Image (cartoon, rainbow, N blue to C red):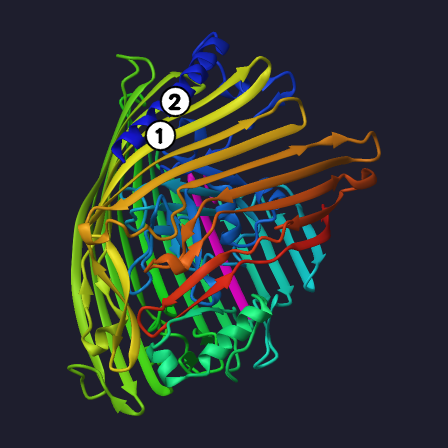
Amino acid sequence: MKNRFLNGVGLCAALALPAVAHGQAAEPAASADASTLAQGGDAKIDDIIVTARRKSERLQNVPVAITAITAADIQRRNIVSVQDIQRQVPSLQSRQVASSRDQISFRLRGQGQSIAGSLPAVVAYFEDVPTNAAGPGLLYDLESIQILKGPQGTLFGRNTTGGAILLNPRRPDGELGGSIDLTAGNYGLRRAQGALNVPISDSLKIRFAFDSNQRNGFTKDLGTGADLDDRNYFGWRVGILLTPVEGLENYFVYDRYRSRSNGGSVVLLDIRPGSLATTLFPGITGDLVEQRRRGKRIVEFSTLTAFDDVDTESITNVLTYKVSDQLSLKNILGYRMSRQRFTGDSDATRFPIIEERQSPEYHSGSYSNPQSQKAVTAELQAQASLLDKQLSLILGIYYENIKPESSSNIDETIQFGNRVSLATLRYDRSKAVFGQATADLSRLITGLRFTGGVRYTVDNRRIRAKNVSNGVCTTVLADANCFREIAAKFSEITYNISAEYQPTDSTLIYLAHRKGYKSGGFNPGVALGLLSVFGPERVRDAELGIKTDFRLASMPVRLNLAGYVSKLTDIQRTRQVLANGQSFTATGNEGSANINGIEVEFSAVPVDGVRLSSFYSYTDAGYNLPALKNTPFTITPKHKFGVSGSYKMDLGEGVGTITPFASYSYQSLTHTSNTPDFRDVQKGYGILDARIDWDKFLDTPVSVYVFANNITKRSYLTTFLQFYNGIGFSAGAFGEPRMFGAGVKYGF
């Protein structure tokens, strides 16, 4: 494994050296504008601004592996949900939680969430505030989506071991204007998006945006007649930017989201002969035969009426005060509320093996989905530039408090015909102090900089759990209300050390070493005394990267490469537990693992109007514990690549421009469950998407477009429920079929 990685790093270096040479040859003076280097004639590659280090910088100047998706890319690639994002980013995977398509977990560089009681390894941030509501209905009117790879344990709110995803909404500006975008397509797709920007005065600006999306389901449930896997949501937000005096800025964002769908489908895939499931419900064998005959888009559940209701509300306030040219202060306050009610038939049969039924209260998170919760976050930071800009500092404190939306949340499941009432109420409180400094040593060696950062985090986690089976309290060590409460405290010091060398404005070489940490937690089976507490997970990595813009002949080229080695210790890993006639997914700490890989991103402009881009990632992940030596890493394809291209054609005065676009992404074989075996294998597959835009239609502010996603109708798993070795069956959910449509957008 080590030799394979070193060979890969050598390949990265070999590929990059010509690029560095081109970059140096193309720029006669280090002071030249880097944006001019990636252009030839009128053709150019635009600069992208990112905030990976909590300040605005050119992507090419930041010593972090980042993929940035611009507002234009979001539209061009028809990105509606986070599962659409994974097709654009090396090393990124997304996975829906159980049958709910409104709840998504991420994996980056092989690291993700083990689901049962653990915190995510990859956190999504909306305007610098952590959010667990990163599903459909949030990815509209955005300035950009930034994917930061590797541990982000110093500057960002929560500690993570895998990375961070930054969602940045478009801020109000000084121009009066807006847009309305209407889309229709197959499966009854009806979508409307809009935005309105109003500058009330030089000091007060407001922006309003919305997204309404309805679509019929693509899976039919014969048991209830419902169309599953449908979409029915409405989201809106308002942003207010206030600059009352010079140096003082306050940005306020209010965001609402409401989804009312029939829920997602789950398809029965396999059963184990002689298992508990076949013993109690012999007819399940016939259900499997029928399911295979019908195919993946028709299921037959019990008479359980399916629904999936999600409501979220968020408030963000960012107050920035520029004390002087050398010092600025920032205060970030966030409030997040999320509620979910749903029913689900996890066994995907007519029998009551595992059915989740909600009470009138909202979901408590007792099974495997995130709980309905309220979260309050606060962050205070100071940024300083000292010693004639040779030293930059950022210091800060962070606080987060998460509690259930209701203290009486109770979920009901049917397991083997038994009525089980569950409640798992989680209370999390996190506090941290952090600091990071960057020293510019250009006076000694031009372009040399060192960065060091450290963070100390304390996580206090508490859980109240309840278990009632057929009206009888089965909670171990229960109080008078059948609840058991336990608490734990976790703390860790994490850090970031990097050296960067920028020989020219167009080339950056960096080497980074980081430590990340993911808090410990509790298992859903805590009420029965099963594996109650598990410990933190830690990762240490080293990353070598090169970012360069150059010209190949007259063609502007951008090439970013990163190679990394990482070691995980005390890995949080899940397994199925069967106890007292109930099935649980339990997490425990199991040894260490090595994850090594390479990531390449390339873009070029061969001629004016033509844009080409591609990416590739190689991930080599393996456990070190002898008992797990042959166990594959879950949801981690070894190879992943994508290519895309567009050609903007001017049709002449008074006609407009037409831009065809196409993209193809592929990932190799993947194990799709958290407890992988040979049954959860998703073979390698590729997805082909395309779109054509006609802008300035007949010399008007109108654009018309047509699009198609998954053109070749590839079938692939988006989640896998592994109960085969326990109860005796396995089931899974599948991705969207071919989707196509057309739309019109009017800008004013």
Identity of the residue drawn at 18% across and 58% down: 535
Task: Give x and y (percent) for residue 492.
Answer: 17, 49
Could you classify mark 2 by the number of other residues whose Cα lies within 10 Å: few (under 14), some (14-19), or many (20 or more)? many
Where does residue 386 sit, x and y in percent of width and height?
Answer: 28, 26
Residue 390 versus residue 638: which sits nearer the camera?
Answer: 638
Amino acid type, mark 1: Pro
Q: CA distance from mark 1 to mark 2?
A: 8 Å
Kind of element beneath mark 2:
strand
What stretch of residues is rendered in magenta? 243-260
Q: Looking at the image, is mark 1 or mark 2 earlier in the sequence?
A: 1
Asked if labels 2 and 1 touch by Cβ distance under 8 angstroms, the answer is yes
- Could you say which disc has been placed on residue 380 in the image? none
Identity, as a three-letter code, of the amino acid under mark 2: Leu
Position of residue 636 relative to residue 35, above or below, is: below
Magenta region, main secondary structure: strand
The image quadrant of residue 691 is top right
Residue beneath disc 2: 508
Image quadrant where one finds the N terminus: top left
Q: Give the percent coordinates (x, y) of residue 581.
A: 28, 82
Q: Quadrant of the C terminus?
A: top right
Q: Nearer the viewer, residue 209 or 65?
A: 65
